[in-house]
Image (spheres, rainbow, N blue to C red):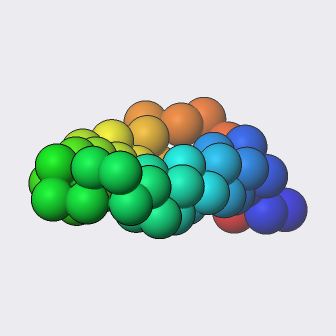
Amino acid sequence: MRNQHGLDFLTRACHTAVSLWQDRSTTYTGRLQVCAYSTALTTGWSNCTRACPCRAQV
């Protein structure tokens, strides 16, 4: 069984990151925010996959 919860979360996070990246009104600031967001997401995703009870079903 696949980890649907994690897949949905990752999909939403990717769409959010792309939306922030494409916002040209604050290009430099936006890029810094996306970089920080991506780092936080990677760390959070790693912690989630280790702690999530659905992970054991994969």
Q: Is residue 22 depicted above or below 37 in this figure?
A: below
Q: Quadrant of the N terminus?
A: bottom right
Residue pushed farthest front? Answer: 25
Q: Position of residue 57 (x, y in %)?
A: 72, 53
Residue at image location 73% in from the left, 50% down from the top: 8
Q: Position of residue 50 (x, y in %)?
A: 40, 47
Q: Position of residue 36 (x, y in %)?
A: 17, 49
- Left or right of residue 9: residue 3: right
Residue 53 in view: yes
The image quarter in which residue 47 lies: top left
Residue 55 or residue 29, whichever sits in front: 29
The image quarter in which residue 21 lies: bottom left
Residue at image location 33% in from the left, 42% down from the top: 44
Residue at image location 47% in from the left, 64% down from the top: 22
Q: Quadrant of the C terminus?
A: bottom right
Residue at image location 61% in from the left, 57% down from the top: 15
- Left or right of residue 23: residue 29: left
